[in-house]
Amino acid sequence: MHSTKSTLLFVLAMTTIVAVVLAGMSTGLKSIHDKNEALYAKKATLSAVADHLGMDFSSITNEQVIEVFNSQIEQLVLDAKGNVVPQAQVNELYKGGLAENIDLGKEFKKPGDEQLYPLYIYTKKDGSKYYILSARGKGLWDAIWGCIALKDDLNTIAGVAFDHKAETPGLGAEIKDNPSFKKQFIGKKLYENGAFRSVFVRKGGAKDPVYEVDGISGATITADGVTEMLKRGLKYYEPYLKTVKG
Amino acid sequence: MATEVLTQKENKGFSFGKKERALLTDPLNDNNPITVQVLGICSALAVTTGMKNALVMSIAVVFVCLFANMITSMLRNSIPKSVRMIVQLVIIATLVTIVELTLKAVAFEAYKQLSVFIGLIITNCIVMGRLEAFAMANRPYESALDGLGNGFGYGIILLAVAFFRELFGKGSLFDYKIIGGSAEYLIDTTQSWLFGWYAPNNLMVLFPSAMFVIGILIWVHRAWNPKLVDIS
């Protein structure tokens, strides 16, 4: 029979070994994990302009994603007043200093006038530009976020990509997995007669052809989260969009 | 079941005879963890929307089953009886975390899709059940075979369920488009004279269909295998 002392010793030894093995593995693989994570985020950003890449997005390779990002995408960091923040200044907060390094979840915890927003400008081979904005909000269970690509009139949506942390598969997760939900956003407009209106995800079906899309059955709260995220998140870019429009 | 009777006295070497073969093949058929013991149903419902997810999950469970059984069996004489469940859980959790970290490094997309379900292997009754029922009483060699057998038994059902769900729900297998309403598919239902009436059934992708498919599989399995017929 085992004495209390030997039981304690066994448990202690086991915990130590397990802790060392797992900690070692986690640190050892960290650089690869970070690389995968960054690539995944890049691909998600690109999927907002999937129809305008000039290649089949479903079979895009990692190398192509990086190549498009390096050659056709300009990354800007904006402050609350719509000014472009120089990279050196962003560097103090985020390693890398690029739009892709910005963590919106962290930014939204800061006071409003100190927040920074990432912006990607994708230049198509024919010279037309697409502005990819980022937004972040709450779904039913946890965070949801998305990229919204605008055409160069800075009003019409060219494509969207959503992602979520823990929405229910088959219900809330449809905002990411259901292509026909995302397709609805294409051609929708953000401004009505110059005033910001945003796009509304309406339960029971869109009533306005330009500013509303159909909701998802069984995912009302997630859909409301998308509406809120767009309304609040895209508004932050208004000062910048105004300066570009001139 | 017959597999539990094996003791260390009967076997000394690493021979592969009738008993060892039974350890591997029993869980595939007569003692299948899903269709006969009805364990691990939760994950079988969740990850069977596509063959790819089911395959990754199966490989993960085979790995965890194999090594959890082996390690537990190696330690079986030194594990204090009063904390044996906790020790088993720690062994399983460690292996699952290793699987998770590895997947995150080599198959990131699959990792993103399976997300919570990989972590939930820890609570998969098949793994814990085999440790308690078999590995605590048998040598590492037999335990490894038993772990492999049960992992495969789980995987084979997972793949079978995923086959029906993906084929009839999405019209594809391993994301390779087989049948559907556009030119991208192997059989284009808008063109084919034979399959013009066919349309993929979205219900098959949702969870309830997994219940139906597993239920039908259990029924067919019991009807087909005479050993499973309940005489009472």
Image (cartoon, coloured by chain):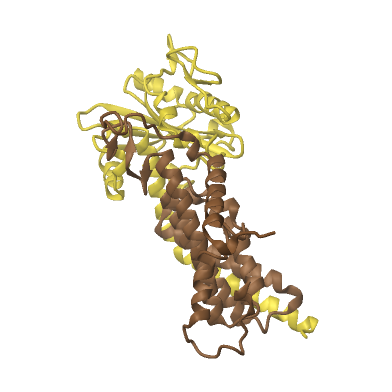
Identify which residue is drawn at 42% across, 49% down.
B163
Is residue B99 toward the left or the right of residue A155 in the image? Answer: right
**Chain B colour in the picture:** brown
Where is residue A47 shown, x and y percent of the image? 36, 37
Q: In the image, is residue A80 above or below residue A101?
A: above
Q: Quadrant of the N terminus of chain A?
A: bottom right
Extreme-top residue of the structure? A193
Q: In the image, is residue B3 above or below residue A6?
A: above
Q: In the image, is residue B77 above or below residue A210?
A: below
Identify which residue is drawn at 50% across, 56% down.
B157
Extreme-front residue of the structure? B231
Question: Taking the image as drawn, is residue B146 in sight?
Answer: yes
Extreme-left residue of the structure? A126
Where is residue B53 shown, x and y percent of the image? 45, 51
Count of numbered labels shown in the rendering:
0
Is residue A72 toward the left or the right of residue A229 in the image? Answer: left
Q: Quadrant of the C terminus of chain A?
A: top left
Where is residue A155 shown, x and y percent of the image? 38, 19
Where is residue B111 shown, x and y percent of the image? 46, 53
Q: In the image, is residue A142 above or below residue B119?
A: above
The quarter of the picture where residue B150 lies is bottom right
Q: Front-most of A168 and B146? A: B146
Question: Taking the image as drawn, is residue A88 in sight?
Answer: no
Extreme-right residue of the structure? A4
Q: Front-most of A205 and A239? A: A205
Is residue A154 toward the left or the right of residue A53 in the image? Answer: right
**Chain A colour in the picture:** yellow
